[in-house]
DNA sequence: TCCGTATTGAACT
DNA sequence: AGTTCAATACGGA
């Protein structure tokens, strides 16, 4: 059975993000890509559902919005909404480790692999990163390749560069 | 079971 | 210094 997700837009200076909430918390976060904007424009409005949003979810959304904007502004958010991460244990370990990376710091895929006790699973790590449902809040953009090179990024490499630049990192 | 992957480090131009 | 290549762990089909 599929869990019903509530989809809410978050307008930022960098575009309109889309947050998906389950009954347990924030489940997914969507980058504002060209399609997104185009679709939103086409519909005249970004997903204005008439479904009733519970107070609980409104609260989470508020936290998400604040946290997101903080990060885009280059500062570390103090409050996070609960995250409803769905994935394998391996993926959850990876995502959890990534959340521990503080703003302005970076780690290599190899580092993460080492921390979760599987030094050789670097490639699998990349896989897990690509499936990270919540970019930015789970700072997958702070994970670089070994030589401090940018790896890749789901939302586009531009975003990764931009986010890192926001945090004062240079290349 | 086979394929792809956001890696890595060593060998080879 | 840039490029190619095999090894490797995990998830999806």
Image (spheres, coloured by chain):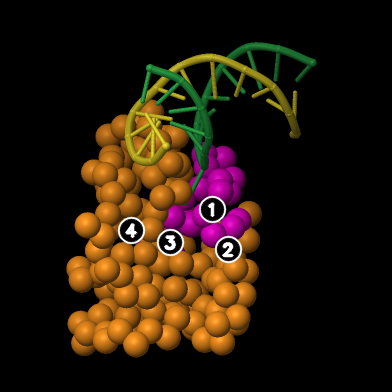
Chain colours: A orange, B green, C yellow
- The x and y percentages for residue A102 are 37, 61
Which picture quadrant has residue A121?
top left
Q: Are marks 3 and 2 in contact (CB under 8 Å)?
A: yes
Q: Which residue is mark 2?
A: A159
The N terminus of chain A lies in which quarter of the figure?
bottom left
* A135 shown above or below A15: above
Q: What whole-number distance in Å separates the C-alpha atoms at marks 3 and 4?
A: 10 Å
Tag 3, which secondary structure? loop
Of helix, strand and loop, which mostly describes the magenta segment? loop
Q: Which residue is mark 3?
A: A135
**Magenta-drawn stretch contains A149:** yes
Pointer 2: residues within 10 angstroms few (<14), some, or many (20+)?
A: some
Q: Which residue is mark 4?
A: A99
Q: Are marks 1 and 2 in contact (CB under 8 Å)?
A: yes
Which residue is nearer to you in this view: A37 or A3?
A: A3
Upstream in sequence: badge 2 or badge 4: 4
Which picture quadrant has residue A24?
bottom left
Disc 2 is attached to a residue of which chain? A
Which residue is nearer to you in this view: B4 or A83?
A: B4
Q: Residue at horizontal 25%, vertical 80%?
A: A57
Q: Which numbered dot is residue A153?
A: 1
Q: Residue at horizontal 27%, vertical 85%?
A: A53
Q: Residue at horizontal 46%, vertical 67%?
A: A30
Pointer 1: residues within 10 angstroms few (<14), some, or many (20+)?
A: some
Disc 4 is attached to a residue of which chain? A
Say whether mark 2 and mark 3 are on the same chain.
yes
Q: Is residue A154 visible?
A: yes
Q: Residue at horizontal 58%, vertical 63%?
A: A159
Upstream in sequence: badge 3 or badge 2: 3
Tag 4, which secondary structure? helix
Disc 3 is attached to a residue of which chain? A
- For the magenta stretch, what is the residue range? A136-157
């Amino acid at each position: 059975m599929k869990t019903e997700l509530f989809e809410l837009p978050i307008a930022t200076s960098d575009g309109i993000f889309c947050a998906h909430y389950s009954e347990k918390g924030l489940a997914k976060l969507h980058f504002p890509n060209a399609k997104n904007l185009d679709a939103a424009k086409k519909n005249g409005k970004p997903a204005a559902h008439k479904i009733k949003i519970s107070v609980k979810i409104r609260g989470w959304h508020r936290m998400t919005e604040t946290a997101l904007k903080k990060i885009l502004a280059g500062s570390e958010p103090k409050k996070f909404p609960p995250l409803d991460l769905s994935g394998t244990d391996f993926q959850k370990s990876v995502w959890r480790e990534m959340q521990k990376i503080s703003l302005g710091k970076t780690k290599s895929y190899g580092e993460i692999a080492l921390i979760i006790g599987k030094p050789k699973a670097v490639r699998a790590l990349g896989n897990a990163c690509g499936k990270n449902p919540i970019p930015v809040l789970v700072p997958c953009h702070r994970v670089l390749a070994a030589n401090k090179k940018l790896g890749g990024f789901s939302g586009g490499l531009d975003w990764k560069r931009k986010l890192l630049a926001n945090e004062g990192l240079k290349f």
